[in-house]
Amino acid sequence: MTRVRSSICFNFRKCLHGFFSDQILILQAIQKQQLVMERIHRLRQKANDTASQVESLQAELGRAKSSLEMANADNNRLLGQLEAADQKQNELQTEVDALKKSKKRACRAANNAGFNEAEQSYKKQVFATQDIYFKAGWKSACEHLG
């Protein structure tokens, strides 16, 4: 009977061991499943966050593109104004240069005319002095001229 008892006991232990090991395996499987579910949840959350970031960046990109288009339009408009201003400046500079040349010529002509007039006046004075000198003498010429 001891032998039967020991074999029952051994079988019972084996059975218990098998039962507990099955429960342990089930618990381990549940824990693994829980870890997998947590990881799936984190990945879904990360995917949602990434999707919202993508939407935000796309909206920002759209705003940046429209802003760039407006800036390019303003830039083109300003470049057109700059070219027109440069052209006007060149025209005015040409006109100023022509006026400077004209002024220089007029100054030279006026200077020459003044010189010629002074020379003619001087000649008249010299001839008048000569006439007085030859007609009335040296003393009379000095008295007359002062």
Image: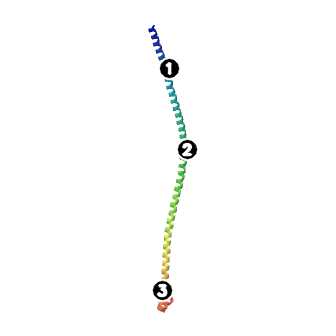
Q: In which quarter of the image is the N terminus?
A: top left
Residue, disc 3: 127
118 or 15, which lies in front?
Answer: 15
Query: Element type at marker 1?
Result: helix
- Tell me the kind of residue under disc 1: Gln
Q: Which residue is drawn at 46% across and 10% down?
A: 5
Query: Element type at marker 2?
Result: helix
Image coords of residue 8 (percent x, y): 47, 11
Dot 2 crowding, Cα within 10 Å, few <14, some 14–19, many 20+ = few
Residue, disc 1: 23
- Tell me the kind of residue under disc 2: Arg
Image coords of residue 121 (percent x, y): 50, 82
125 or 35, which lies in front?
Answer: 35
- Tell me the kind of residue under disc 3: Phe
Contact, mark 1 vs mark 3 (Cβ under 8 Å): no
Residue extending farthest left? 3
Residue extending farthest front? 2
Mark 2 to mark 3 CA distance (whole Å): 93 Å
Q: Which residue is drawn at 52% across and 32% down?
A: 42
Image coords of residue 141 (percent x, y): 49, 90
Dot 3 crowding, Cα within 10 Å, few <14, some 14–19, many 20+ = few
Identify the mark nearer the N-term, 1 or 3. 1
In the image, residue 63 sits, relative to residue 29, either above or below, namely below
Q: Residue at x 50, y 63 (%)?
A: 93
Residue, disc 2: 63
Mark 1 to mark 2 CA distance (whole Å): 59 Å
